[in-house]
Image (spheres, grey):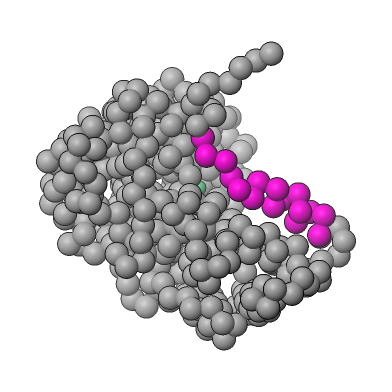
Amino acid sequence: MIGFSDRLRALPGYPLAEIPAIKRRLVEQGVDVIDLGAGDNDAPPPDIAIETMVGAVRTTALSKYGFQQGLPEFRQAATRWVERRFGFRFDPATETLPLIGSKEGLAHLVFAVANPGDVAIVPEPGYQAYIGGAILAGAEPHIVPLRREQQFLLELDQVPESVLARAKIVFVNYPNNPTAAVATPEYLERTVAICRRHGILLAYDNAYCDLTFDGYRAPSIFETPGARDVAVEFFSLSKSFSMTGWRIGFAVGSRELIGALTRVKSYIDTGPWLAIQKAGAAALDQAEALVAPIRSELERRRTAGVAALKAAGFAVDSPKAAMYLWVPLPADVPSAVFARRSLEEAGVVILPGSAFGPAGEGYFRIALTVGAARLGEAASRLGEMLERMRRGAFATTA
Ligand SMILES: Cc1ncc(COP(=O)(O)O)c(C=O)c1O
């Protein structure tokens, strides 16, 4: 018999791992399932990415190992985009690193800074790669609950000094998944200041920086003075360009920090497929034109989804960014029960707050991955579901 490692056993379970199987069964039974689970937009990838990819697939040189260096064209397009978007420059060769999706880089970064027993500070609710990366690297996760009364901000000054002294890395993600919260410049300043004081690496996950509404503009961590000494910032082509399955993102930061992540990765992977890097470069070079329609469609969905959920009896806030609605539940309704019944009885896939850790309890997450009319339909089914749960009735059909 093969025994498993303590690290594997320490990985938190996913409370609704059975969702895909239930969904498949319902679809086979002819139920009209509305899937608002994964943050995977229904928009196609940009034509320019597809066309570039088709040519790239036929280019033998792009079928070879990319190694960590990858395609210089991608690094250059990434740094050009950062410069256009935020106004500052990173060296494409030494301060930029292509990733097999930003998740991969986020999870691997812990290996570069934490020894077994060191602390990694992770938000909860939060993206699973943070705690997973920490545990797999042998670090000790220190969970910081994100609370609505604090605008879902991870406040390092509320972490005990003794923990900060042992912390080697903190994961910060705004616009946030799953709460859709955003960060102010003042928040980023105090966070950078504490990281500098304690020598904590700030992994700034900016996967949703271009999915912003109502004129809001999401900052880069590097707009904060002093951030270059302590931060690595992660960007993704997944959400902005509807390219989730392509697995392409990148990190930027100082030569030392990017060099450290590069060294870790060189023992684990051989970089994203060069053809995808070529297609990604083409998309990045046209980012402004390509992202605008995705952003405005998400804004329409956000507005319609919030209105429909309110009409259905949910007290949801209207977010300024990301692609999620983080919806409060009545105190006596456990989110996993609500999510399971929503799927089985209303045919709507949502994620329970508890899937993002115990501090996510009391909420569910809706991904704005379908059009406004379908969101409206989902909201009214969820409203009826909640009503049935409130009345304690046991309904069996959608
Ligand atoms: C907060 C956050 N960071 C990173 C990612 C990963 O994106 P990628 O597809 O680039 O790995 C996601 C994906 O859902 C996310 O929600």
What range of the chain is rendered magenta?
11-26
Residue drawn at the location 61% of the way across and 38% of the way down: 57
Residues 63 and 115: in front is: 115
Q: Residue furthest right?
A: 29
| Quadrant in the picture for residue 392 | bottom right
| Quadrant in the picture for residue 64 | top right
| Quadrant in the picture for residue 208 | bottom left
Answer whether residue 378 is visible to the viewer in this image: no
- Examine the rendered structure and indicate whether residue 14 appears above or below residue 263: below
Residue drawn at the location 24% of the way across and 46% of the way down: 159
Residue drawn at the location 81% of the way across and 60% of the way down: 27
Is 20 colored magenta in this rendering?
A: yes
Q: Residue furthest bottom?
A: 311
In the displayed structure image, the side of residue 53 where residue 186 appears, left or right: left
Residues 74 and 300: in front is: 300
In the displayed structure image, the side of residue 25 where residue 168 appears, left or right: left
